[in-house]
Image (tube, rainbow, N blue to C red):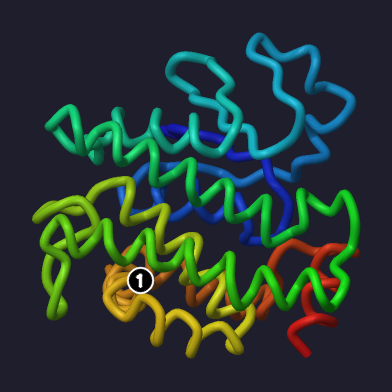
Amino acid sequence: MLDYKLYYWDLPFRGNFIQLMLEEAGAQYERHEATEIYPDRSLKLHNPSMAPPYLYECKSKTYYAQMPACLMHLGREYDYLPKRAETHTLALKTILDCNDILVEITNWNGQVMWQKNDWESFRHSRLPQWMQIFEKTGLDHGLKGGEGYLLGSQISVADIATTALFGTLVYSFPEFEDDLQQTAPHIAELCQRIEARPAIKSFLIKQREEYGRGYCGGQIERSLRKMIG
C-alpha cells in the first residue's frame, strides 16, 4: 500500500530532504512531477502552498507543503524526533537553518543572479559561519570520532536534513568538499555515514546515475556553476 506521493522536480535540492527521510523510514512512496500540481492546482489544495515540494499522505488524504513542515511531520510519524524538549526544538531549528542556507545559496531563490563580489563574500564568510554552527551543534551533543549524531546518540530527522543539505551540496559541487572538511570535519564525516546507510545509499546511487550532479536547475544553477567554475 502506498504511504505518500511526493510532488517535486527531477532535481535533489529541497526534494532530497523529504526523499532521504522517506527512504530511511522505509515508507512506500511515489515521486510525481511538480507540474501535476504547480502552479495551476496549488490554490485548490486543502492546505495550499506557494511552491513545491508537496507531500500527499495517502492514509489521511492530506497534503503537506514547505520542506521543514514535511520533514517534521515525517519525523513524528516515523519516530525520528528527539524526545527531550530542547533537542526536539533543535531538530526543527536545524531544518530551518538548512532551509535558510538553500535560500541564501540560491541568492534568495534566484531573485537576482550571483555577481562575483557577492558570491565571494557568501562563500568565504557567510557559508563557513553556517558550517561552523552545524559543527558546534554536533560537538555540543557528542558528535566525534565517527560516533554519535547531530543531537545525541540516536539518529534523528536533523541528521537526515544535514546530510540532504551538505551531502547534496558536496556531490553536486565537489569544489565545496574541502570547504566542508576544513570548516566542519565532523559534519562531513556525519554526512558520509548517513549516506552510507543501506536505504539511503541505494537511493542515492540510482539518483546520481540518472541525474548526475544536477542541483537546483535553470538559471540559478547556471549562475552557481559560473561562480564556482
Quick one: quadrant of the N terminus? top left
- The residue beneath circle 1 is 191
How packed mark 1 is, by other alpha carbons closer than 10 Å (few <14, some 14-19, many 20 or more), is many
Where's residue 99, x and y in %? 56, 46
Q: Residue at x 63, y 81 (%)?
A: 173
Q: Nearer the viewer, residue 58 or 93?
A: 93
Q: Amino acid at mark 1?
A: Cys
Quick one: quadrant of the C terminus? bottom right
Where's residue 9, x and y in %? 73, 51
Q: Specify the quadrant of the image occupied by residue 207.
A: bottom right
Is residue 181 rendered to the left or right of residue 69? Answer: left
Q: Nearer the viewer, residue 138 or 63?
A: 138
Is residue 184 rendered to the left or right of residue 154? Answer: right
Q: Residue at x 38, y 34 (%)?
A: 74
Q: Specify the quadrant of the image occupied by residue 133.
A: bottom left
Where's residue 71, x and y in %? 43, 38
Where's residue 128, x and y in %? 50, 71
Q: Check disc 1 and report its element: helix, strand or loop.
A: helix
Q: Residue at x 89, y 25 (%)?
A: 40
Q: Nearer the viewer, residue 112 or 196?
A: 112
Is residue 187 rendered to the left or right of residue 215? Answer: left
Is residue 178 rendered to the left or right of residue 140? Answer: right
